[in-house]
Image (spheres, rainbow, N blue to C red):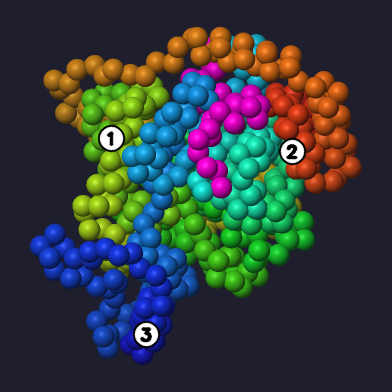
Amino acid sequence: MDAADIEAGRERWQRRYDAARKRDADFTTLSGATVDPVYGPPAGAAYPGFDRIGWPGEFPYTRGLYPTGYRGRTWTIRQFAGFGNAQQTNERYKMILAAGGGGLSVAFDMPTLMGRDSDEPQSLGEVGHCGVAIDSAADMDVLFDGIDLEKTTTSMTISGPAVPIFCMYLVAAERQGADIHKLDGTLQTDIFKEYIAQKEWLFQPEPHLRLIGDLMEYCAREIPKYKPLSVSGYHIREAGSTAAQELAYTLADGFGYVELGLSRGLDVNQFAPGLSFFFDAHIDFFEEIAKFRAARRIWARHLRDNYGATSEKALWLKFHTQTAGVSLTAQQPVNNVVRTAVEALAAVLGGTNSLHTNALDETLALPTDESAEIALRTQQVLMEETGVINVADPLGGSWYLEELTDRIEAEAEEIFARIRELGHDGSITAGILRGIEDGWFTANIAEAAFVYQQSLEKNEKRIVGVNAHTGTVAKELEILRVSHEVEVAQKRELGARKAGRDGVRLKEALDRMLAAARSGDNMIPAMLDAARAEATLGEICEVLKQEWGVYREPARF
């Protein structure tokens, strides 16, 4: 790129920066030196390939979505939390918000994630253990008691039964008196990654996509700020993928949802801004930063060139990041504080829009209040003390980082081409569905995980406390234990709630939902009525299982 084009870009950036709102903050180093909001090539210098790097806030957004970087606004601190019953989790949420958290992120227990009620036989021993138990809208009332949903962005990490859970959230907001049209938050809903990595599905892929399409339509029409899909690479990476596989499989899933929206006749410029992303921040510092930068660049180019998006917001890839749970070790768990800090810094330098930091004890149990606070303070130290938020994309232009960004982008493009080849019509969606059916994704992830495990066992890769520096004076941690009484009390409360319902109203609501499923009508209004009638998650899902059947992963050897 010649010097004149670079200077023209710098001037465009300056105009946008000057017009943008900035935080009232001290943008100097610890020693008091003033720093510029962005850095680039010296004035008058040419820089080959600079069009792929660019300036913050300009296509292809390699350096971030906003000309101000974090000078405009910092990332949202969104701590993922949920355990026991709704009352216990509500207390944790209030602690997080009081301590400076900027939004809530709900972790559900395994029965809820699988669309089952707490009193089903399959739920025995799992109620409240890996997240909060939610059986009906009444639990949502308690979960968000005293928390103004109209003013609190709320993320919910659930995919298989995401739509009925979303309806229960809307009912809880209605009961608070909230203006539903003003709600802001994110629902994961990403069913592709369940078949690829996490395995928490209910139905065949096609009915799941039908529900997701209904949700996209409903949110575009009724709740414009709410993001109905958070396309998740986190679980793909946690299953053992490489960074390039995480990036490519996740963006491919995102392209699949774009194709779904287009098939519903939705305007890509309207619905694409409602797609958000969720990535893993792993321990290889520069590789992770490169991954995030490449993600923005790939998404913007494909949305513009392949899917016809023209509005700036439709080209933006907004993403939440969580530090890598799989990097945490049970051995010497205090070391996990260091790992989490490094991973969080990579997410920040990669331009994340929101961030969850894992607690040091999460490899052993759900976090205690103390470890949750340390995880929260990790983000706040990065934000308040390190100076990394003073400059937009401070590592941009690094020879090493730019090479890594180009390399991971090229690997991702090769994977996209292979996915398209898998399909019968050249679309990403057809390729994803064929890859799920054939076990292509899971086989590739398993191979990557195997290769990494071999390198650990050969001591080619080293983990402190596991296969290096294993001596320690640390004592055993006190961990959070969820009492069996939580399950007993939840089942007792659920039984009383079921007994107190209007049976006629409940049956009529479930019948209307089934009729909508059969007719092809948008199912959200009918499902909302079922939630208002206190239909349980298990009851709603069972009606749909009876209609659509359940998905069983083919056996592979």
- Asked if residue 370 shows in the view, the reply is yes
Q: In the rendered view of the protein, which quadrant contains the N terminus?
A: bottom left
Residue 512: horizontal and vertical position, in percent?
86, 35
The residue at which mark 1 appears reads as 374
Front position in the image: 511 or 495: 495
Front position in the image: 460 or 371: 371
461 relative to 291 in the view: left or right? left
Front position among marks 3 and 2: 2
- Asked if residue 228 shows in the view, the reply is no
Q: Residue at the location (20% across, 30% down)?
A: 468
C-alpha distance separating marks 1 and 2: 38 Å
Element marked by disc 3: helix
Amino acid type, callout 1: Ile
Amino acid type, callout 2: Leu
Query: Neighbour class for label 1 at 10 Å: few (<14), some, many (≥20)?
Result: some
C-alpha distance separating marks 3 and 1: 42 Å
The residue at which mark 2 appears reads as 528
Contact flag, marks 3 and 2 (Cβ < 8 Å): no
Q: Read off the magenta span.
A: 125-150
Query: Neighbour class for label 3 at 10 Å: few (<14), some, many (≥20)?
Result: few
Q: Which tag, 1 or 2, sits closer to the chain's start?
A: 1
Amino acid type, callout 3: Glu
Q: Identify the mark at residue 174; answer none if there is no mark.
A: none
The reply to whether the magenta stretch includes residue 138 is yes
